[in-house]
Image (cartoon, helix red, strand yellow):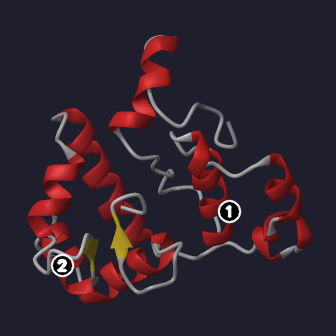
Amino acid sequence: MLFGKTPWDCKNIKDLINMPKMQPIRFPVQVPISNMSKLFIQNCLQVEESKRISFDEIFKSEIFLTTKAVTQTAMSEDSKAVLQQFQAIYQRNSLDLKKIFDNFDKHRDHKLDNEELTKLFRVFDPNIKQEQCSQILKCFDSSNDGSLNFQEF
């Protein structure tokens, strides 16, 4: 609702309830959001209740205790365009994100590093630069480990 819509595009409430089991949350490319905010939202929207952040943890979280959450991660217009193109192709063709992710996870470590991410995006835009992929990775790497796990992807 921070972006004026639900996290998943669904036609009915039943689909909205089931969608988190089938598809990880994705943040709009055109709206900058800090990694801290992304991680907070992801923790709130965990499917399994045991993994979900509790009310006590919510109010003790860094996002409520600091103003750093309003700091936005900058992304160039070129990088945003690449992501928007990828999102449009993915949605238009109903592609399976997990299969795409797994196909480019050459190290089989359940993460995409900068090299793997660059190869993935070059399928959709052969002219993408390594620097753009590095910037995209940095913007979505909420765990700050230099790679994207499937949820961050």
Is residue 16 in sight in this rendering? yes
Report the residue marked by disc 1: 37
Left or right placement of residue 3 versus residue 60 in this view: left
Q: Is residue 153 above or below residue 95?
A: below
Quarter where residue 15 is shown: top left
Q: Earlier in the sequence, mark 1 or mark 2?
A: 1
Left or right placement of residue 36 versus residue 131 in this view: right
Report the residue marked by disc 2: 116
Q: Is residue 63 above or below residue 139?
A: above
Q: Residue at x 26, y 54 (%)?
A: 86
Quadrant showing the N terminus = top right
Which element is circle 2 on? helix
Residue 18 is situated, as x and y percent measured from the top left of the image, at 42, 24
Q: Residue at x 55, y 45 (%)?
A: 46
Q: What amino acid is found at the position of numbered circle 1 in the picture?
A: Ser
Quadrant showing the C terminus = bottom left
Q: Residue at x 81, y 55 (%)?
A: 58
Q: CA distance from mark 1 to mark 2?
A: 25 Å
Residue 63 is situated, as x and y percent measured from the top left of the image, at 80, 66
Which element is circle 1 on? helix
